[in-house]
Amino acid sequence: VFPGVRQAQWLTKTKLVEGLPPAVQGIMDNPALGLQELEERAKHMVSHARLWDTAEAAPRRERYCPMLFENLIHICRLMSGKYPSLSKRMLARNCRIAATWERESILLQVRGLSGILMNSMSPIPPVASKEEILATKEHVLETFYPIAPTIDLQEVNVYKELNDTGHMCPLGFRDGYPYSHLHTLFFLESANVRTDRFRPEQLRAKMLMFAFGNALAKAKALHGNDPKVLEQPIVVQSIGTDGQLFQFMVFQLNTTDLVSNDGVKNLVWIDSDQNLYERAQCVPEIKKGVVTKPAGISGFQPDTFKKFLALYLHGTV
Amino acid sequence: MAALGARRLLRPGRRWFSDTVPSAPSPPASPLYPPVVASITAKSKAAKSRRLQRFNQRVHEAATVEEKLRLYGKLQRPKYMVYPQTFALNADRWYRSFTKTVLVPGMPPRAAAAKPPVATAGATSETGRAPEPRAEAPGHAEAAGEAEVAANAEAPGAAKTPEPSAGVAPCPDIGELRSLACDALLQESFYQNKKRPFLYRDQDHTPGPFLTQLVSTLAASLSRHNPLLAASSLDLNPEVNYYWHHGNEVVVHGHRKGRVDPVRFQIDDNPHLQIRVPKQLPEVVPLESDLGDVPVIDHKPSKLPLFKKQYENKVFIGTKVADPCCYGHTQFHLLPDRLKRERFIKERLEDQIEVVYRSNGIASLFAWTAAQAMYQGFWNEADVTRPFVSQAVVTDGKYFAFFCYQLNTLALNAETIKNNPRKNICWGTDSKPLYDVVEDGNVKGFNDEVLLHLVHFLLNRPKEL
């Protein structure tokens, strides 16, 4: 699926807001977290993933992208020393997720290995207030006339709609799973070859589609299959990276009524193209006897790590 | 003619001039001749030892640790590849003889301050907690030979509740940790939808992810009790390599036939999970302790079977030298499918099951601690001045065996081992199951003892912290 974010917005009936929601900003600005000391550790983790991890000269992206993610998650998890409720989270890898919905008489389905999930026992509280949700009624989704909105989507004959109860569990987990609320989805673009990786725009669209699919599956599991406006909106976060560039997204599902084009819309906050560091040199670059680029990590941006941590802590802090 | 005349003038004993009788020659300020040493390039034993001395001098004088490691492993020759996870019979005896290790069954005695007691749910009887390592006053830790099963270690005066250091919570709650462990197990084996396991890859399907989840969640929740964990670094699937010489052999065939060569070994290990810390774990027993005997095996290593190959001599702990977390804390090893218990039982080799765990523990931990020591600049000519301690847990998903290794000496090659009384020590337990069976979303027969052992391992830290 290669749609841009605008197309994904139309397909999921979503309104886009630039930047992260104020709740997450509030966590970032909270001085009690002690984010300053963590910056040093985060820099070490980046150096470890990009420079020190392997006995060869430099690790490849297939190795350093997951390693960087694991290191950052390790730092975030160690915060459960301060906030014990953080231990009510569980990471799940290699999950299979599927969701189906109808959009103006077109049946859409999103499926696949959606990367790494983080589930928690308690859901994230809604990020947007009731007024903002109602205000989305006036928002008009941009259409792409004359291009059909389903351009570049694969048309497939699906014989089993996976939302039905039965053997297939759309959420990827059986009933009774204690960590039943999806908290965050992580997407790692770790292919070595650049053409195998998603470009940032496509990655954001993929994140949006999967976040929507998961939220929709959860909504149908909680409230049934009837399309309606949700009393308790479901919030799902999503972080995508290729080892250097980070995309942050918070998605709030307000309605499962997706057939019509008006009414309450869903909301998504996207913070895109955040660099964690400028450059990681394993061997210093020397031109004509002068060191032009010294070895090490240069241009480390602590704000990106703060956003990562804030999204991790969102919901418990 | 001039030459004859010159010779007559110079005839000894004849004095042509009445100069003063020369006094006894004054002792020369510096030697007149350079020292008489063996040649560098000759084909003789003296020349060979002189070349070796020059090489050792070069390594001693290396400016950085990377340079030292580069020189140490510069010469490539065929070497035995030692695999920590091996099916060879009685491999742990062979590995102990290669690494000069003493195996002590049970767990080591620990000093009082390093281990807060864990609050168990329900009644806690002192004898009920006997199998775990017990708190002991530091004075008693000196007594060697007390490394037997920790039932000995119920020493009087043991501090049952040491004062927690500032900022560290006193007791982790075993009920909470048990629920974390059960949740991880259930998620991986029951709740999550997974495809069927690939052929002979059962370990990657369930026990692998379970171990990762268990360790990461336990380490995170125990980090408030152990500040060393809060500064730790968790590696997934790292690489650990070590290269060393031990003993002498005669080259059998080839153009170097007949020469006496050191026996070279290389361990290339891939633990499942590794925790590295910036501060070293404290020593368990003093550097010069003697807790047992090292087995001596008269056969060549190739009889084990071990095979030779020539490739890069790597020494690596999991990261490069520049990393500040350069000391090891705990490693976790997952046994592969080919070393399953059922296979050994089917071939009527039940006694070899424990051998697999032990050989994995000894070889992996020796490689890790020795590589850590080399990262600090020690090598077999410059032996360690403080012991290096690391821990390991070897598991196949259900059965867990715990090992603690103290490296006392790196000097294992033929010249340096002659006057070296020190031995490396490895404490190890037998494998015990963590649970009996997982059925219908319930874990049956959960064994708290194994979990407590794991928790004690993760809580291990230097005395100052």
Image (cartoon, helix red, strand yellow):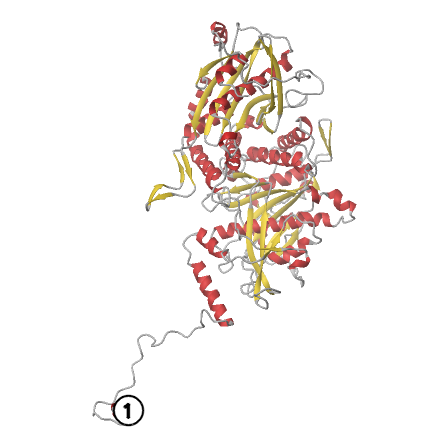
In the image, what residue type sits under mark 1? Arg
Residue marked by disc 1: B7
Crowding at mark 1 (Cα within 10 Å: few <14, some 14-19, many 20+):
few
Where is residue B293 shown, x and y percent of the image?
64, 60
Instruction: Quarter of the image for the N terminus of chain A: give it.
Output: top right
Between B112 and B145, the one lying in front of the other is B145
* Quarter of the image where one finds residue B451: top right
Q: In this rendering, is residue A30 above or below B34? A: above
Between B399 and A161, the one lying in front of the other is A161
Q: In this rendering, is residue A5 above or below A133? A: below
Q: In this rendering, is residue A171 above or below B174? A: above
* Chain label for disc 1: B
Q: Is residue B69 visible?
A: yes
Where is residue B401 shown, x and y percent of the image?
66, 44
Where is residue A239 shown, x and y percent of the image?
51, 25
Q: Residue at x 48, y 39 (%)?
A: A48
Between A313 and B55, the one lying in front of the other is B55
Where is residue B90 shown, x and y percent of the image?
70, 54
Which secondary structure, mark 1? helix
Between B226 and B165, the one lying in front of the other is B226
A7 horizontally vs A93: left or right: left
